[in-house]
Structures are given as C-alpha cells and as structure tokens.
Amino acid sequence: MVRELRRELSERLTLWQRGREFDADEEDVERARLAVAVVAGYADSVRRAGTPMAAGEERVLLDQVTAELVGLGRLQTLLVDDTIEEVHILGCDQVRISRHGGGVDWAEPIADSDEELVEILQRRPAGPAPPSGHCRPPSPPSTCNCPTAAGWPRCSWSATARTR
C-alpha cells in the first residue's frame, strides 16, 4: 500500500510542478500538503469500507509514504528509531538491528528486491549533507556513521552485497 500511495503522491507532485517556478521550501510545503491529502484519502476509503484506521496508524502511514518519496523508504523508519544503534543490511529481506542496551533483532524486509534495495541505498537522504569525511556514498557495500542532522540517521548502518 505504501508504494501505491507514494506513486500517487509523486504523480500529484509532478502535476503541481509542471509549468511552475518554485523553490525548495515551496516544494517541501506542497509535498507535505499532498502527502497528508493522499494518506487522508486512503484512510477515508478504509473507514468507508468499514475498517476504521486509528490516528496513530494514519500518522505511521504518512511517515512511511513520505520516507518512500524523499528518504530511504522502509530503512528510514529504522534509522530514526532512537532505540536502534546499528542496522546491518544483508539483503532486502535480511536486516539485523542492534538496539542500545544490547538487544539484537531481525527487522522486516526494507525492500521488495535486492535491486530495489540498491536503488534505495543510492538515494541521498533529504536534508543537509554531513560534514565531509563522515560518510561514503551509500552504495553497497557501504557504511554510514553520520552525525545527527536533519534527515540523517542517529544510528549507523552498513550494507553488503549478497553473494549468490
């Protein structure tokens, strides 16, 4: 569902951009407005079908849709989780997380295929880049230990090409 809503958001944003001059701030405001409209429309259709969506679920969906469009997709939700210290990506469906305090878990898949995972990792997160020397370009194998800055993770992550 997140991918479908992201696609709808992307299409609406593209229509808004056509033939218009705008700056990054205006685009951010419009993206946020459209994201809320797209997710609210979906939540309303779910409610009309008899399955109400809790406000918290709607907010999570909004965050996921926005992360798919401008961030690192499902990986973004792990990177901004304050309880997670490290994310080890061993493939689209093999994601090991280490939590502050010592716990280790396996996360849900962060992409539908390894090819999609490579695309996600090649995207630069929204927001200012970290100071020079803190990150290598995010393409597998990769490691990122970025300082906390807008759009950059609070935890470290690494990805290794899967051997077949």
Image (cartoon, rainbow, N blue to C red):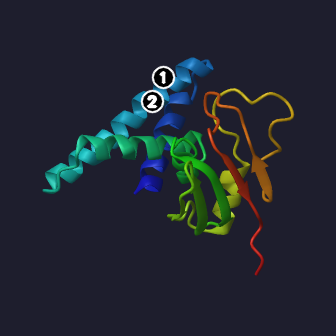
In what element is the residue under mark 1? helix
| Picture layout, residue 28 above or below residue 91 | above
Q: How crowded is mark 2: few (under 14 residues within 10 Å), some or many (20 or more)?
A: some
Q: Quadrant of the C terminus?
A: bottom right
Q: Which is more toward the observer, 106 or 33?
A: 106
In the rendered image, residue 4, in percent from the top left (x then y), is placed at 44, 54
In what element is the residue under mark 2? helix
| Picture layout, residue 110 above or below residue 91 | above
Residue 58 badge: none
Q: Residues within 10 Å of mark 1 (few under 14, many from 20)?
A: few
Instruction: Name the residue tied to disc 2.
Output: 32
Asked if disc 1 and disc 2 are in contact, CB closer than 8 Å, the reply is: yes
In this rendering, position of residue 51 left or right of residue 14: left
Q: In which quarter of the image is the N terminus?
A: bottom left
C-alpha span from label 1 to label 2: 5 Å
In the rendered image, residue 156, in percent from the top left (x then y), is placed at 68, 46
In this rendering, position of residue 37 left or right of residue 102: left
Residue at x 57%, y 22% (from the top left corner): 20
| Picture layout, residue 117 above or below residue 35 | below
Which image quarter: residue 126? Answer: top right
Q: Which is more toward the observer, 14 or 141?
A: 141
Which image quarter: residue 134? Answer: top right
Instruction: Name the residue tied to disc 1.
Output: 29
In the rendered image, residue 14, in percent from the top left (x then y), is placed at 54, 36
Residue at x 73%, y 59% (from the top left corner): 159
Question: For the residue marked with disc 2, what is the amino acid?
Answer: Ala
The extreme bottom residue here reads 164
In the rendered image, residue 95, in percent from the top left (x then y), is placed at 60, 64
Question: For the residue marked with disc 1, what is the amino acid?
Answer: Val
